[in-house]
């Protein structure tokens, strides 16, 4: 019955690939559809807040609420879209979620609508501006007729998109 250990090995690998929590490493899944773009951000809380526990002191509470507010309301400062598309970010959602082993993640949903379809161009990422603790931003980008991605060092860089 050699297939049992192989199956267990594969399922363990699939789990760890989907739920990686590595300090300094954040993920951003971007989807472009017509004139809208949505992005799901996930990062160890340590890389966004500088600590990873339920905020206790007044300073920690202030740090946490300021960081969540940037992710929620100022995502246009983190993701810069082609100017000619005329995109505007809408208020999104941001929260802190507890993970296994006493870890915490910061999760955020971002959304923008544009005056013109986002067919091709360049997206600039500037997470370093507010979150210098992010050393790697792993970006996946899907849209009509294309799928691309890159690991952006220091949370600052660009990705070209288009068919
Ligand atoms: Zn952690």
Image (tube, rainbow, N blue to C red):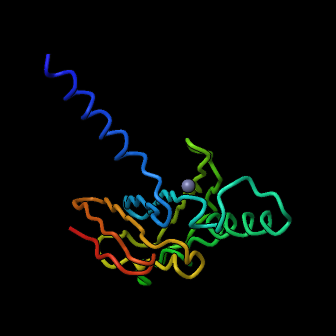
Residue 39, x across and y down, in percent: 47, 60
Q: Quadrant of residue 150?
A: bottom left
Q: Quarter holding the N terminus?
A: top left
Image: 161 above or below 72: below
**As rendered, which of 158 and 104 lies closer to the eye?**
104
Q: Residue at x 56, y 78 (%)?
A: 77
In the displayed structure image, the side of residue 62 where residue 163 appears, left or right: left
Q: Would you identify the image quadrant in which residue 5 lies? A: top left
Looking at the image, which residue sits at the far top?
Answer: 1
In the image, taking residue 36 as reference, residue 44 lies left or right, namely: right
x 65%, y 66%: residue: 49
Q: Quadrant of the C terminus?
A: bottom left
Q: Residue furthest right?
A: 58
Q: Nearer the viewer, residue 31 or 83?
A: 31
Above or below: residue 59 compared with residue 55: below
- Residue drawn at x 29%, y 76% as measured from the top left: 160
Residue 133: x and y in percent read 55, 73
Q: How many marks?
A: 0
Q: Residue furthest left?
A: 2
Location of residue 115 in the rendering, given as x and y in whole percent from the top left corner = 46, 72
Q: In the picture provided, is 20 more to the left or to the right than 51?
A: left
The quarter of the image that holds ligand 1 is bottom right
């Amino acid at each position: 019955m050699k297939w049992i250990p192989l199956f267990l090995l594969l399922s363990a690998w699939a789990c760890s690939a989907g739920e990686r929590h590595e300090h300094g490493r954040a993920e951003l899944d971007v989807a472009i559809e017509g004139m809208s773009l949505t992005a799901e951000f996930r990062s160890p809380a340590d890389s966004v807040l500088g600590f990873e526990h339920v905020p206790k002191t007044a300073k920690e509470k202030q740090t946490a609420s300021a960081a969540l507010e940037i992710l929620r309301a100022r995502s246009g400062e983190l993701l810069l879209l082609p100017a000619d598309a005329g995109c505007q970010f809408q208020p999104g959602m941001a929260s802190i979620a507890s993970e296994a082993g006493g870890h915490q993640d910061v999760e955020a949903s971002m959304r923008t609508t544009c005056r013109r379809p986002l067919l091709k161009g360049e997206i600039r990422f500037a997470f370093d501006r507010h979150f210098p603790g992010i050393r790697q931003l792993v970006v996946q980008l899907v849209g009509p007729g294309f799928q691309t991605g890159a690991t952006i060092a220091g949370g600052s860089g660009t990705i070209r998109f288009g068919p």
